[in-house]
Image: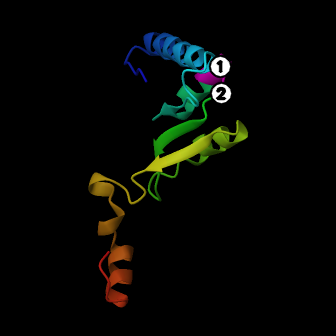
Amino acid sequence: VFFSTDEALGRRKRTEIWRALEDAYDAGKVRAIGVSNFELQHWEHLRESWRVRPMVNQIECHPYLPQTELIKAMHAEDTQVMCYCPLGSGQLGLLEDERVLRLAARHAKTP
């Protein structure tokens, strides 16, 4: 979905795009609609105007980025959470975490 450094433009574009998805859903062209990488402020803005709630929000989520408040807000609307990067990403990768390395060594396993 559309993100912009101009917040007002981003809000308008996200709303327009969501309306098109709702229309496709209402017309029976799609069975489910959702969003990806919506942060809490994006979620709250969309909630103000949706006719059809998102069925899913795909977000990065792992022990270093638990997204607790966002997940609570989604669950309150009966929206599913689909997480990616459950082991972290880049320099935050859990496979390089000292605790994971120690556990792996203790059990003679790879991280």
Crowding at label 2, few (<14), some or many (≥20) Cα neighbours within 10 Å?
A: some
Q: Which residue is mark 1?
A: 50
Residue that carries the numbered disc 2 in the rendered image:
53
Percent position of residue 17, x then y: 49, 15
Q: Is residue 104 above or below residue 97?
A: below
Task: Please name the amino acid that badge 2 sits on.
Answer: Arg
* Left or right placement of residue 61 versus residue 44 in this view: left
Quarter the C terminus occupies: bottom left
Front residue of this view, candidates 56 and 99: 56
Image location (x, y in percent) of residue 6:
40, 13
Q: Quadrant of residue 46?
A: top right
Q: CA distance from mark 1 to mark 2?
A: 6 Å
Decide: few, some or many residues near mark 1? Use Cα within 10 Å; few <14, some 14-19, many ≥20: few
Q: Is residue 47 magenta?
A: yes
The answer, for residue 97, to whether it is visible in the render is: yes
Rendered location of residue 31, percent (x, y): 58, 30
Q: Does dot 2 land on a helix, a strand or a loop?
A: loop
Report the front residue among 64 and 43: 43
Colour mapping: rainbow
Q: Is residue 92 above or below residue 16?
A: below
* Three-letter residue code for mark 1: Trp
Q: Position of residue 4 (x, y in %)?
A: 38, 18
The stretch in magenta equals: 45-52
Residue shown at 37% from the left, 18% from the top: 5
The circle on residue 29 is none
Please tell me whether residue 28 belongs to the stretch shown in magenta. no
Q: Are marks 1 and 2 in contact (CB under 8 Å)?
A: yes
Residue 38 visible to the viewer:
no
- 7 to 37, vertically: above or below: above
Residue drawn at x 32%, y 84% is 109
Q: Element at badge 1?
A: loop
